[in-house]
Each structure stands twice: as C-alpha cells, then as structure tokens.
Amino acid sequence: MTKFTLDDLDAIVAARAKSGDETSYTRKLVSKGVAKCAQKLGEEAVEAAIAAVREDREELTGEAADVLYHLLVVLNVSNVPLGDVMKELGRRTGQTGLEEKASRPQE
C-alpha cells in the first residue's frame, strides 16, 4: 500500500499553485479562478459517477484521483484548508449519517 496521502497531494497543489512555473497545470488552472476550478471539479465528478455506473473499476480509480486532485485545487483557490475539511469529517463521525443529516437546518 502506498504511503502517499491527501496531505501530500494538498502540499503539492499548494506549492504548484504559488509557483511561477508556466508548465504547471495546477498554476494555470488556479490562475483562471475559482469558477473554472469548480467547473473542472464538477466535470471530473460526473465522469467518476459515470464510471461507477458502468462498473468500470479502472476508470473509476482514475476519475476518483482526478476528483480528489480537483477538489484540493478548489479548496486551495477558495482558501479552505484541507485540515478544516478533515475536522468537519471527524465531527460528523460522532453520529450516524442520518442523525447528521437530520441536524442540518431545514430549508
């Protein structure tokens, strides 16, 4: 099993987002702003969902990696630390998913 973590990827995204490297896809994407970054995240999420429905494990694995990468880019450009997301996930694990959903404000 690999030791590569989301924290590792988050650090890479952060470094590349700040770099002046004209060949960095991350830097170019971040420079286009949050709307473009969010659009790419949405596209990758749809592709992952389609791969899941097709039961294509290999494609789903690749698309899931794309989703995680693009989510970290969106978090970076939105100034939301991955640590904050992890804290929120930790908070939610103290109750069942149905309890957590029921505790959300009703629209």
Image: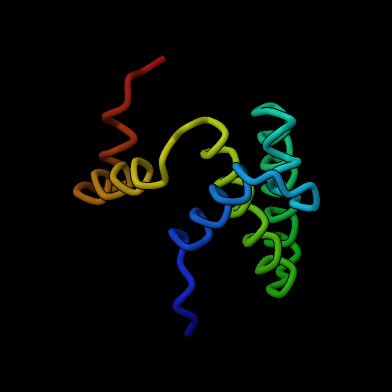
- Farthest residue in the front direction? 20
Name the spot of residue 30 as percent of width and height, x first: 67, 37
- Farthest residue in the top direction? 107
Looking at the image, residue 7 sits to the left or right of residue 68; the answer is: left
Looking at the image, residue 96 sits to the left or right of residue 36; the answer is: left
- Farthest residue in the bottom direction? 1
Q: Is residue 34 above or below residue 26?
A: above
Name the spot of residue 50 as percent of width and height, x first: 74, 55
Name the spot of residue 62 as percent of width and height, x first: 70, 66
- Residue drawn at x 34%, y 41% is 84
Tally of numbered discs:
0
Pick whichever, 101 or 37, lies toward us. Answer: 37
Q: Is residue 68 above or below residue 62?
A: above
Q: Quadrant of the C terminus?
A: top left
Pick whichever, 30 or 72, lies toward us. Answer: 30
Looking at the image, residue 107 sits to the left or right of residue 24; the answer is: left
- Residue drawn at x 47%, y 85% is 1
- Residue drawn at x 44%, y 35% is 80
Looking at the image, residue 59 sits to the left or right of residue 5; the answer is: right
